[in-house]
Image (cartoon, coloured by chain):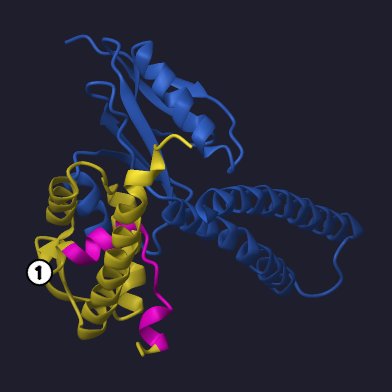
Chain colours: A yellow, B blue
């Protein structure tokens, strides 16, 4: 049973999911935006205002932490709690994806 | 270079930020590019060749820390100035892709919540300011002074309430978009 202090954040929005995913290595804001654009194959792009707001929220909730500040650029990394949330989200996405894949062949079949 | 500075006055309510953004974009298509917000609902424009710009407004990131400006600049936005808690940004539209500062309903809701909070806190602030003025001039106040003070205070309350309601409606609208 996964603890409720983890599950209360789920499901993550697409933006939050990709921000946490990108922070598997410490990165600053603009680097996150570029990485998300790339790994999501341009399906998700995060505006700088949205990212800034997400930093504030995620840091307050203890899912990420600021690890350094250089030239007015703050770099963040996942906390242990952030890692747990991300892992649980991935597990749920796997189930969702598996379910989706299993019905796909029937989806366009004539009745 | 022969650039002309033009000042235009136009009134927008605080909940009409998107209308303001669209208007600024339209001005740029006519060759008038925002230099920065001016005083008393005015805008300073610089005349030049017509361009396609996306203008975006953000409202008060607290004390507006340096890293906020740095992050948005890093993403290719030009900072045009701030007025009454509003930050003015623009970025050129390329290949029909309209650049956005906010890309999800959550962050847009947060922006309007900051704006909402500013109206909620403004009423007590006005009240305290009024009391301070009364204290400054002890003794009996002329009736016209009291009437003027009370009517100004009431006018501000009405103004703040209208703004707060309009902004709350925007927030509700965005929450509905978020639901599905």
Q: Height in image: B128 above or below B156?
A: below
Of all chains, the one bearing label 1 is A
> Where residue A18 sits in the image (x, y, percent)?
24, 59
Let me know if residue A76 is in the magenta part. no
Magenta stretch: dominant SS? helix
Range shown magenta: A4-21
The 10 Å Cα crowd at callout 1, few under 14, some 14 to 19, many 20 or more, is some
Was residue A14 drawn as part of the magenta stretch in this picture? Answer: yes
| Relative vertical location of residue B43 with respect to residue A39 in this rendering, above or below | above
Q: Position of residue A57 (x, y in %)?
A: 36, 70
The residue drawn where x is 34% and y is 29% is B54
In this orientation, which residue lies closer to the viewer: A19 or A76? A19
Q: Is residue B35 visible?
A: no
Check the image and report above or below for A88 versus B149: below
Residue that sits furthest to the front in the current view: A111
Q: Would residue A19 be found to the left or right of residue B126 on screen?
A: left
Name the foreground residue: B10 vs B6.
Answer: B10
Q: Which residue is mark 1?
A: A26
Which residue shows up at 70% across the image and 52% down it? B165
Going by the picture, which residue comes out furthest to the right? Answer: B143
Work out which quarter of the rendered image holds the N terminus of chain B and state it: top left
Residue in view at x 43 percent, y 18 percent: B26
Q: Quadrant of residue B73?
A: top left
Is B156 on the left or on the right of A89, as rendered? right
Q: How many marks?
A: 1
> Residue A44 at x, y = what percent?
27, 46
Q: Horizontal and vertical percent for residue B8?
A: 48, 21
Is residue A97 at least partly visible in the picture?
yes
* Placement of B177 over or under B130, stated as above or below: above
Horizontally, residue B20 falls left or right of residue B170, namely left
């Amino acid at each position: 049973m996964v603890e409720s202090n983890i599950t209360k954040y789920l499901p993550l929005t697409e933006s939050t999911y990709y921000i946490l995913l990108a922070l598997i290595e410490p990165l600053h804001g603009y680097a996150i935006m570029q990485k998300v654009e790339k790994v999501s194959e341009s399906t998700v792009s995060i505006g700088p205002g949205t990212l800034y707001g997400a930093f504030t929220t995620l840091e307050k909730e203890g899912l990420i932490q600021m690890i350094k500040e250089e030239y007015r650029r703050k770099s963040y990394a996942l906390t242990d709690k952030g890692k747990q949330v991300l892992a649980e989200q991935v597990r749920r996405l796997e189930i969702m994806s598996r379910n989706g894949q299993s019905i796909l062949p029937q989806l366009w079949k004539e009745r | 270079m022969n650039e002309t500075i033009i000042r235009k006055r136009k009134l927008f309510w605080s909940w009409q930020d998107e209308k303001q953004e669209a208007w600024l974009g339209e001005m740029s298509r006519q060759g008038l590019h925002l230099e920065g917000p001016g005083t008393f609902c005015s805008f300073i424009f610089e005349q030049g060749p017509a361009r396609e710009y996306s203008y975006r407004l953000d409202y008060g990131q607290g004390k507006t820390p340096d890293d906020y400006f740095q992050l948005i600049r890093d993403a290719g936005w030009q900072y045009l100035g701030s007025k009454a808690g509003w930050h003015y940004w623009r970025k050129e539209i390329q290949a029909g892709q309209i650049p956005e500062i906010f890309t999800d309903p959550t962050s847009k809701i947060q922006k309007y919540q900051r704006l909402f909070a500013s109206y909620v806190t403004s009423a007590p602030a006005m009240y305290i300011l009024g009391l301070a003025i009364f204290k400054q001039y002890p003794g009996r106040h002329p009736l016209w002074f009291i009437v003027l003070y009370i009517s100004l205070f009431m006018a501000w309350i009405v103004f703040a309430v209208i703004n707060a309601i309009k902004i709350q409606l925007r927030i509700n609208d965005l929450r509905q978009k978020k639901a599905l």
